[in-house]
């Protein structure tokens, strides 16, 4: 183990922050409990921020360690906000008594300003708010999985394979946006 890796593991352990460790056996997320030139002991967590156990990793098999990057901060955010991220999914109000179409769900999302995930036939899924919808296309205010603005997209309505109204990812993005808005005030 080199000095840079040792320093990063010490910093993560002292600050009690999550690291992502890539090895030949996979990627592991967790808190550094202890480490030496041969092993690191992690209290592991899932990508959802849920604690799973304690694991030793041979440092000879480690190819990369990530600390305080966007992905790791997102996992920490989920871990610290489980009551919102893993809340019972809300169903769209007013859609239970009518014939449903993708356009109707998107129109309702636009009306109530609901952040949705659009799964597309082209496999370039996106998160965002529906700004406008016409008979055959829609305008989406797009956000990254980290809650960062990512411009606007116009797409053909027929390209939408599925609409995800409320799940772990959309609730996380909404919470990140609300948090950012309250910090800006």
Image (cartoon, rainbow, N blue to C red):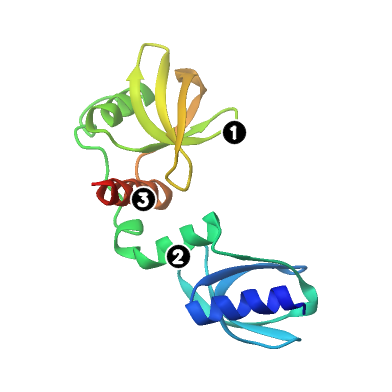
Asked if residue 11 shows in the view, the reply is yes
Q: Helix, strand or loop at disc 2?
A: helix
Work out whether mark 3 precedes mark 2 in sequence or the reverse, and give the earlier one: 2
Q: Nearer the viewer, residue 173 or 158?
A: 173
Quarter-wise, where is residue 149 in the image?
top left
For the point 55% across and 76% down, the residue is 12
Q: Quadrant of the N terminus?
A: bottom right
Could you say whether the residue bearing mark 3 is in a helix, strand or loop?
helix
Q: Is 182 placed left or right of 133 in the picture?
A: left
Along the polypeptide, which appears first: circle 1 or circle 2? 2
Q: Secondary structure at mark 1?
A: loop
State the image coordinates of residue 49 (x, y, percent, origin top left).
46, 66
- Separation of marks 3 and 2 at Cα, in angstroms: 12 Å
Name the residue nearer the viewer: 60 or 24. Answer: 60
Percent from the top left, x then y, of residue 109? 29, 31
Q: Is residue 111 left or right of residue 20?
A: left
Vertical order, 156 against 110 (above or below) = above
The single residue placed furthest to the right in the displayed view is 60
Residue 71 point in image, percent of width and height: 54, 56
Q: Is residue 100 visible?
A: no
The residue pinned by badge 2 equals: 76
Residue designated by label 3:
176
């Amino acid at each position: 183990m080199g000095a840079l890796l040792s320093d990063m593991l010490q910093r993560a352990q002292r600050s009690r922050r999550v690291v992502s460790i890539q090895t030949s056996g996979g990627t592991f997320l967790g808190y550094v409990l202890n480490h030496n030139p041969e092993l690191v002991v992690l209290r592991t967590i899932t990508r959802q921020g849920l604690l799973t156990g304690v694991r030793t990793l041979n440092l000879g098999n480690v190819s990369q360690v990530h600390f305080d990057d966007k992905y790791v901060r997102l996992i920490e955010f989920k871990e610290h906000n489980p009551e919102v991220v893993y809340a019972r999914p809300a169903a769209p109000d007013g859609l239970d008594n009518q014939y449903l179409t993708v356009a109707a769900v998107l129109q309702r999302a636009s009306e109530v300003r609901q952040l949705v995930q659009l799964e597309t036939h082209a496999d370039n899924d996106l998160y965002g708010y529906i700004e406008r919808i016409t008979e055959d296309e829609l305008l989406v205010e797009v956000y990254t999985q980290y809650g960062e603005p990512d411009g606007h997209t116009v797409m053909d309505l027929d390209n939408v394979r599925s609409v995800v109204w409320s799940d772990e990812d959309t609730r996380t993005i909404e919470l990140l946006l609300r948090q950012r808005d309250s910090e800006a005030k």
